[in-house]
Image (cartoon, helix red, strand yellow):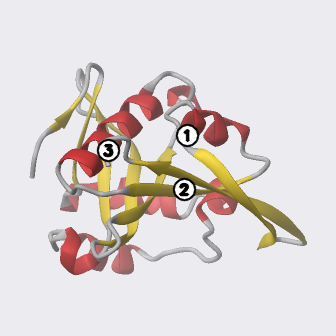
Amino acid sequence: MITLKGDTIYLRALEPEDLEFTYAIENDESIWEVSNTQTPYSRFLIRQYLENAHQDIYEAKQLRLAICKNDSFQVVGLIDLFDFDPRNQRAGIGIVIKNSENRNSGIGSEALALLIKYCFTHLQLHQLYANIGTENKASINLFTNFGFQCIGVKKDWNRFQNHYADEGLYQLINPAN
């Protein structure tokens, strides 16, 4: 895979050693609302997922990359492409930074910039989209800073605990197309 390296972070394919990190993210109830997760994942299921993470994006229709710090090689988050649609040249994108001390530090911006460039340059996608809860101001700011535009709001789209929340659909068209 092409190395996706920035000034302070790099993106890499998932490794078997990422089991505990991925397990912690998938089972962190504080982010379930933004990740649209409803049940915990077992180590067994995550291990199976990691064993199949070698699949090509054209086969799996998704790609999950670890966000790592250049200086310490520490994994700090995950960035995903999902619903990869090569026929229509589009994919969804999502990002999560695990610990609050790494949020609002530029890590998410650098990771998103690297993945957008990869998508438009190497995968030759026409568009990317993100589904973001209308209350998630940090994610809205992150994506709109890269030119994503809200093209619609899905009312009462996600149910979390005892309430429904709206979700915005943000889209970025490849400026080179």
Q: Residue 143 carries which label?
A: 1
Q: Can residue 2 be seen in this view?
A: yes
- Mark 3 highlights which residue? 115
Between 88 and 142, which is closer to the camera in this rendering?
88
Outermost right residue: 162
- Helix or strand or loop: what does disc 1 sit on? helix
Label 3 neighbourhood size at 10 Å, few (<14), some (14-19), many (20+)?
some
Instruction: Tell me residue 110's x, y (percent).
Output: 38, 29
Q: Residue 114 carries which label?
A: none
- Mark 2 highlights which residue? 130
Between 108 and 52, which is closer to the camera in this rendering?
108
> Dividing the picture into quarters, in which one does residue 163 lie?
bottom right
Q: What residue type is labelled 3?
A: Leu
Which residue occupies 50% across, 21% down?
105
> Dividing the picture into quarters, in which one does residue 55 lie?
bottom left
Q: Is residue 47 left or right of residue 92?
A: left
**What whole-number distance in Å separates the C-alpha atoms at marks 3 and 2?**
13 Å
Q: Can residue 52 be seen in this view?
A: no
- Helix or strand or loop: what does disc 3 sit on? helix
Q: In this view, does 154 lie to the left or right of 19?
A: right
Instruction: Tell me residue 66's x, y (percent).
Output: 30, 48
Q: What residue type is labelled 2?
A: Ala
Q: Which amino acid does label 1 sit on?
A: Phe
**What whole-number distance in Å separates the C-alpha atoms at marks 2 and 1?**
8 Å
Q: Of the residues under marks 2 and 1, which one precedes in the sequence?
A: 2
Which residue occupies 37% across, 47% down?
174
- Do the CB atoms of the residues marked 2 and 1 lie less than 8 Å apart? yes
- Helix or strand or loop: what does disc 2 sit on? strand
Q: Of the residues under marks 3 and 1, which one precedes in the sequence?
A: 3
